[in-house]
Amino acid sequence: MKHIRFFLPLLALVLVFSSCRHDEYIVYSDEQDTGKQTTEGDLVGMYVLCEGNMGSNKATLDYLDLAADNGTIRYLRNIYAERNPSLVKELGDVGNDIKIHGSRLWMVINCSNKVEVADVESCRQIGKIDISNCRYLAFDGGYAYVSSYVGPVVVSKDAPLGRVYKVDTLTLAKVDSITVGYQPDELTVLDGKLYVANSGGYRVPHYDNTISVIDLATFREVEKIEVAINLFRLRSDKYDQLWVTSRGDYYGKQAGLYWLAPDGNGKMKPQGHIDTHITDLCIVGDSLYYIGVGFNYTTMKNEVSYGIVNVRTHQTVTTQLSDAKEIADIEMPYGIIVNPKEKDFYIMDAKNYVSSGELLHFLPDGTFDWRVWTGDIPAHAAFVWKKR
């Protein structure tokens, strides 16, 4: 990806007795050199979506250039505003999810009620889809599926059921929608079905505890699977299992990681769980990498956890991703993404939520490599691969 700067000419008209000057405000990206050299490979970059604190309208998009022309890995902050100068300064309020599908980059901007779609290579906007309180993305064939809380950001026992919207990835038109559980979060496609984690987070203490199962051929909900309260992350693995996290109730009911597998009739059923609070996870091969921050009401302190679970054996392999001092110094681990080929990994540190965060890179063995400053609350990332 080329680093593109946009320059607008200054138009000056000088008359005999008066002059006029017209300036347009352009936001330029900020660049930081990691000091590390680029290497040959299929991975050429990574987009990082920074949430920005809710209500601050500060969601931004950063880009890690792993194939820079000068041979040095560099990090570009806030590139979306620069490459789309005709749009508003920032992306909007709360960047909630980012994924690449084909040649397009999709970004869910939660409280701005929209999904932004851009060209992967140029990062220029292609269009947007208006979806109220949108949350997360999944893809299957020529369609995107977007979970939505539907209602406003208000905690209430009367908060409405959520929906999943079906969007044509070519035209960006909403072609269908379906009601699911309360406040649906992550969703994933597996064997012709769409699974949706329902949280019920707005209806505290009456949380939802189900996964909605949607048959993609008919786009109808065919089942609800009871798992645990306040579900959040939902991913599938190569063994056709589902992994879903529960945030608990933040008091007495423990957060956990649950796995589901098909029973004798081919229906997904919960098989077991691990008691740990998980903020984000990434599955690569047999390994489920996770990070977590949970508040301990006994000690009145945040407890940070890291680890790897073997998805085949369902056993915890390690509770320590790295012995490096830099990982111990992370203030608020908020996102993790693992290179599926090389197994090196990146951790996003949200710091204090209201100022710049950090992206840290670790080698496969956990050795610290480099760190850079990001936008506010770096939380979601998507790899960019070389065109074939």
Image (cartoon, rainbow, N blue to C red):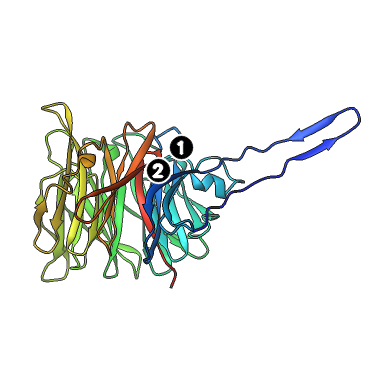
Q: Secondary structure at mark 1?
A: loop
How far across and how far down the image is residue 290, in percent?
20, 50
Q: Which residue is mark 2?
A: 50
Q: Earlier in the sequence, mark 1 or mark 2?
A: 2
How far across and how far down the image is residue 101, in percent?
42, 63
Please give the name of the residue rendered at 36% of the width and 66% of the height, measured from the top-left corner.
41
Q: Is 111 drawn above or below residue 74 in the view shown?
A: above
Q: Residues within 10 Å of mark 1 (few under 14, many from 20)?
A: many
Q: Is residue 177 visible?
A: no
Q: Nearer the viewer, residue 258 or 279?
A: 279
Q: Which residue is mark 1?
A: 58
Q: Are the two marked residues, 1 and 2, in contact with CB atoms closer than 8 angstroms?
A: yes
Please give the name of the residue rendered at 43% of the width and 33% of the height, measured from the top-left corner.
55
Q: Would you identify the image quadrant in which residue 152 lies?
A: top left
Identity of the amino acid at label 1? Lys
How far across and how far down the image is residue 345, in percent?
27, 53
Task: Residue 49: give its label.
Answer: none
Count of numbered badges drawn on the protein = 2
Q: Is residue 105 visible?
A: yes
Identity of the amino acid at label 2? Cys
Q: Is 301 drawn above or below residue 240 in the view shown?
A: above
Side of 85 relative to 240 (left or right)? right
Q: Is 41 drawn above or below residue 350 in the view shown?
A: below
